[in-house]
Image: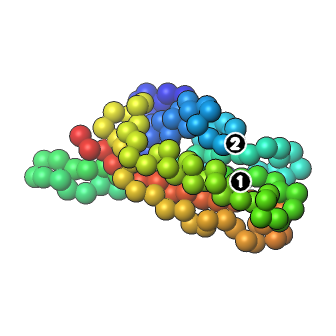
Amino acid sequence: MSSAGSADIIRVTDAVVDELNGSAGIFSQSFTAERKYLAEIDLQTLSGIKVYVVPFSTSRQVRSRNATRQWVKVQIAVLSKVANLSVATVDPLMDLVQEIRDFLRFRPLAATPGYGWQNDQNEPVYSGQDLHEKRQFTSIVTVDFVNTE
């Protein structure tokens, strides 16, 4: 899903999708990541686990007199319909979110030379409102990538 010539945030978002999709067998549950602008789903047609990678923000900071450091933030939404709210149903989804975070930690992005993982946060760990009202597991991981070149 290369986006040569696109804005840095699009190239980084696409690179995260490529990294996640190129890692078959690493995760405990299968999914296909997609780049989206809105992490919305139709619960009527939802089957399996959806992983959406969404461009979130960019920023720059001065590195030296003639150079800047570019930061790109993406959000990874993990979504799934849940039949019930049992620990046995939700725990594997929480595990998958942790696996995605662990997979990206310290990872340089092959499709965007110079960009690598800087930090991440998982907020919300899950949406209690979505679980209660929609029977939908929703977890958001926000990842910062920085251009180190």
- 52 left or right, relative to 111: right
Q: Is residue 50 visible?
A: yes
Crowding at dot 1, Cα within 10 Å, few <14 / some 14-19 / many 20+, comes out as few
Crowding at dot 2, Cα within 10 Å, few <14 / some 14-19 / many 20+, comes out as some
- 63 left or right, relative to 143: left
Q: Is residue 61 above or below residue 23?
A: below
Q: Residue at x 73, y 71 (%)?
A: 128
Q: Residue furthest left?
A: 65
Sequence-wise, the earlier of marks 1 and 2 is 2
Residue 16 position within the rendered picture, expressed as x and y whole percent measured from the top left: 50, 40
Q: Is residue 38 visible?
A: no
Q: Which amino acid type is marked by label 1? A: Pro
Q: Residue at x 10, y 52 (%)?
A: 65
Picture quadrant where residue 29 is located: top right
Picture quadrant where residue 91 is located: bottom right
Picture quadrant where residue 109 is located: top left
Residue occupied by mark 1: 92
Q: Which sits in the foreground, 35 or 128?
A: 128
Marks 1,2: beta carbons within 8 A: yes
**In the picture, which quadrant includes the N terminus?**
top right
Could you say whether the residue bearing mark 1 is in a helix, strand or loop?
Answer: helix
Q: CA distance from mark 1 to mark 2?
A: 8 Å
Q: Which sits in the foreground, 144 or 68?
A: 144
Q: Which amino acid type is marked by label 2? A: Gln
Q: Which sits in the foreground, 66 or 74?
A: 74
Q: Which mark is residue 147?
A: none
**In the picture, which quadrant includes the C terminus?**
top left
- 132 left or right, relative to 93: right
Residue 100 position within the rendered picture, expressed as x and y whole percent measured from the top left: 56, 48
Q: Residue at x 44, y 40 (%)?
A: 12
Residue occupied by mark 2: 29
Q: How many marks?
A: 2
